[in-house]
Amino acid sequence: MAEQFFASLADGLLIGFVYGLAAMGLSLIWGVMNVINLTHGPVMALGMFATFLIFSQLHIHPYLALPLVALLGLLFGLATYFIAVHRVINAPHLSTLLATFAVNMIIIGVGTTIFTTTPRTVDFDMGRLQFGTVTLLGTRLVAALITILVAAGLYLFLYRTRPGKAIRAVANNRAAASLMGVPTARTLGLAFGIGTMLASLAGALIATFFPFTILSGAGYEMKAFVICVLGGLGNPTGALVGGLVLGAMEGIISVFMPNTWVPVPEFILFVLILLFRPTGLLGAR
Amino acid sequence: MNALKYPAFWLTIGLVAAAGAATFITRSPTLREDMFLLLMYVVLATSLNILLGYTGYVNFGHIVFFGLGGYVGFYFMSRLGWPLWWAALAGGAASGLLALLLGMAVFRLRGAYFALATLGVNEAVRAFINNFKPFGGPTGMSLNFAVYQDYGGAANALWITFAAMFGLALLSITVSYLVKFSRFGLGLMAIREDEDAAKVMGVRTPWAKTQAFVLSAIFPGMVGVLFFFKNGNVEPGDAFRIHMSIETIVMVMLGGQGTVLGPVVGSAAYERLRGYLLTSDLFKNLHLAVAGFLLLIIVLFVPAGLVGWLRGRFPKVRRWLQ
């Protein structure tokens, strides 16, 4: 029992890093423009399929394909922002929620037609590490490592570069930033693009662990929301911590009850946090 | 009750009543099946509109109340032998209770938190029902065919369910109309326009929002019981089809959110469109994408929907279109 517990916990923590990566993107978009991005899940699924196609058609190793997937994600995010979100960015929540949701439906609809809903896998082996009774899969270790690198990169970008500082200025006060000569439309588009890029990267990494379909994104999107609320909406560091908490929790739950139950405690956790600690565990703001 | 004097109310009621009456007069089973679905969408869209249109809070999990109510009512009918009427009330009550609990928990917060909660509740309730043994788990439950004898045979039971759905449609439109012109409804619309101002003016916003949510959840709960009684069996895949939540939102937005006539027109138009898309070779698999495209166009360019656009364009017709 104890062995199974630790194995499950370690596994959950490593996957938690990738959940955290997805949630960071969502949290960034929320923090900068107060938009809940409902295209996040389908974009993760697109990241999975991009990795799958590059791997199976071009025979490029999934980790080498990551920069390409990231670039595609960035471009897709920019396009989404300027086509669907920019027009309603100052409208009430209802409009941005429905606009991003409409894009979500278009991706799912077109994706189902092209890829059908047959589960796909990206099949390769990265070996494993043995610590006593606990086995860690290579793919998950590499994914956790990549997440840490991306998070560090995002931090450096936001705090050390000019466009990054512009994003933070716009998040802080859009009108004031605009008066100081920050090109707000471009900056918002960039933030949306980076958020979407993180989602596609998370999708690409998840594709190396689990089978997936075009509909798989919805479940991960929900996890990303729970994580954002855990870590405090709009707080990317909190998102990474929240990802680890949720991953660990999932690992522990799967020891005690069948995996199909997982959405129920996840949702209960979500409601409890909103009830007792709506600013998140780290208590930002 | 002064609100009932306006012509707009009688126009909306008249449209639905005419559709129902035509079905009863022709006694055609095909027309009845079409109309049953249409009226079902009318009730779903009208009830969603109370929250989405009047209060300005988007609910991505409207269908969860349809599924949950259907399941609870079905349980009472198939396992305890309750008649349809009591089961429908029980289904509505169960959905209302879930909305009450969720609303009290989440509505102290504003804006997007509620939308996130509604996205999660669908997954959570479906996972729960899928694993919950008394409700039959993933295989669901089915009715013994002999049950229909109490309603004068299977053929007659279908007409009874249709009549009940027709009544429910008229009721939901009346409720939606009365809410819109009541003090409570004005409070909801004040929340939609500016929640801070509404609070200052004395609207108890969390409680008003919760009441609106409960009201909008009871109807789909009752619809679910009627639908699955007619179906004869219930299973998680049918009860929690997330596409239906989405399509209901499209209907409300298409017809015009915040108007009484809008959801009725929107469900009729969308139902026609979907019928066309599903039968054409090109769009058969793409109908979700087409619905998404339609929703995007509406949100970006005609956020008031069809009825709202007409009201804005031709001020003279406002008396008739509410």
Image (cartoon, rainbow, N blue to C red):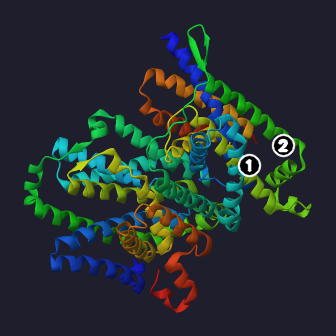
Which chain does the numbered disc 1 sit on?
A
> Looking at this view, is B6 or A37 the one in front?
A37
Q: Relative to residue B253, is residue A227 drawn left or right?
A: right
At a point 40% along the width and 54% down the height, the residue shown is: B63
The answer to whether marks 2 and 1 mark residues whose Cβ atoms lie closer than 8 Å is yes
Q: What amino acid does circle 2 point to?
A: Phe
Q: Position of residue B116 (x, y in %)?
A: 56, 49
Element marked by disc 2: helix
> Looking at this view, is B68 or B250 the one in front?
B250
**Image height of B299 relative to A30, above or below:** below
Q: Position of residue B186 (x, y in %)?
A: 53, 70
Q: Residues within 10 Å of mark 1 (few under 14, many from 20)?
A: many
Q: Relative to residue B255, is residue A129 drawn left or right?
A: right
Q: What amino acid does circle 1 point to?
A: Ile
Q: Relative to residue B208, is residue A161 drawn left or right?
A: right
Residue lying farthest front?
A58
> Looking at this view, is A128 or B11 the one in front?
A128
Q: Place residue A176 in its image quadrant.
A: bottom right
Q: Place residue A257 in its image quadrant.
A: top left
Q: Residues within 10 Å of mark 2 (few under 14, many from 20)?
A: some
Q: Which residue is mark 2?
A: A157
**Quadrant in which the N terminus of chain B is drawn:** bottom left
